[in-house]
Amino acid sequence: MHTATEGYVRAATVEQVRKAGRLVMAIGGHTVLLIHEHDHIYAVDNRCPHMGFPLHRGTVKDCILTCDWHYARFDLMSGGTFDLWADDLPTFPVQIQDGEVWIDLAAHTNSLEHHRQRLQDGLEQGISLVLGKSVIALLSQGNYATEAFRMGLEFGVRYRQSGWDTGLTIHTCMMNLLPYLEAEDKPRAMYHGFGPQRTRL
């Protein structure tokens, strides 16, 4: 029997996935959705990155997976979303060995860079949910409050003629409050500091 590449874990047989069409598996702390589409098997996280709805309830057409709740759409191959208010869907590399499906559960993206980019997306698009999720993620990964503040400050200065003059004051006040707040209240303060951006410019 051939050995799969190091780091890969066995998920199912090809026949199991082919017959089911979609198969949800709990593997290595992940809930993975295996999808058989156009003679290929794809492995993605089963939770919609928008609000966590189980994606196995969604629809698949032309290698595009659509969540059944808010209709966020994802490319099965890359996980890329077609909707800015959602987020990219985590995907897992797949190998087929002797009729068995093996997947690599290791993280293949820089989580910190991803959340920085999503914060920038939220600022530019004025999407409240994206701003809130990005702030929570950045603060949970370490003390990145200063960097998040700087990103908001640069954005506010750039658009101060579009109503961000008072917004900069609110943004700075919220940042100055952070040292005096409990850990669970800090993301909320940062989010409110980004309040003026929630109207798309």
Image (tube, grey):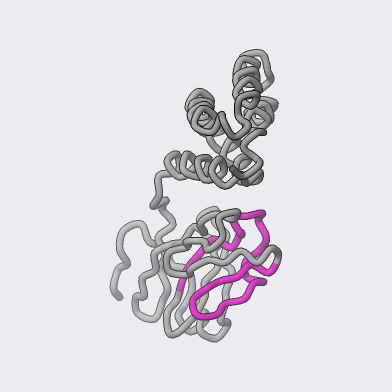
Q: Is residue 102 above or below residue 180?
A: below
- Residue 181 spot, x, y in % from top left: 68, 18
Q: Is residue 61 magenta?
A: yes
Total numbered circles:
0
Asked whether 143 or 171 is in front, the reply is 171
Q: Is residue 174 above or below residue 42?
A: above
At x 39% / y 81%, what residue is drawn?
Answer: 99
Left or right for 101, reference 138: left
Left or right for 84, reference 192: left
At x 47% / y 61%, what residue is drawn?
Answer: 80
**Residue 57 showing in the rendered view:** yes
Q: Is residue 97 magenta?
A: no
Q: Is residue 156 above or below residue 27?
A: above
At x 42% / y 79%, what residue is drawn?
Answer: 40
Residue 179 is drawn in which quadrant?
top right
Asked whether 190 or 201 is in front, the reply is 201
Q: Quadrant of the N terminus?
A: bottom left
- Residue 19 spot, x, y in % from top left: 55, 86
Asked whether 177 or 201 is in front, the reply is 201
Q: Which residues are drawn in magenta?
A: 42-68
- Residue 7 spot, x, y in % from top left: 35, 57
Q: Quadrant of the C terminus?
A: top right
